[in-house]
Image (tube, rainbow, N blue to C red):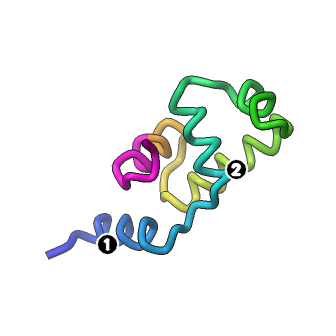
Amino acid sequence: MLKLADASASSVADEGALRPRQIECLTWAEKGKSARDTGQILGISQRTVEKHLEQACEVLGVRTRIQAVVRARELGLLH
């Protein structure tokens, strides 16, 4: 029997709900990079990185970027 949280996690992973840029931003956040650093690495603005991370948090059902990184790891979205 799946718990509600497990079913939700499955749908996120199965549907590929996170976009590639959101996963990239989460990957750099996982490595300890700030939004500013990530923006410089990816050639986008700090605000755009923050927006990608906010959207990733919404999709993953969490409130902070650290929680998003942990959740994405649990779902196998980060390597």
Residue located 80% across and 28% down the image: 40
Q: Is residue 29 magenta?
A: no
Say which residue label 2 marks: 52
The image quarter in which residue 45 lies: top right
x, y percent for residue 63: 53, 47
Q: Which SS class for mark 2?
A: helix
- Please state the total of marks drawn on the protein image: 2
8, 76: nearer the viewer? 76
x, y percent for residue 70: 41, 41
The image quarter in which residue 55 lies: bottom right
Q: Earlier in the sequence, mark 2 or mark 1?
A: 1
63, 25: nearer the viewer? 25
Residue located 56% across and 23% down the image: 32
Q: Is residue 11 above or below residue 74?
A: below
Residue range highlighted in magenta: 70-79
Check disc 1 and give the amino acid type. Answer: Ala
Say which residue label 1 marks: 7
- Neighbours of disc 2 within 10 Å: few (<14), some (14-19), many (20+): many
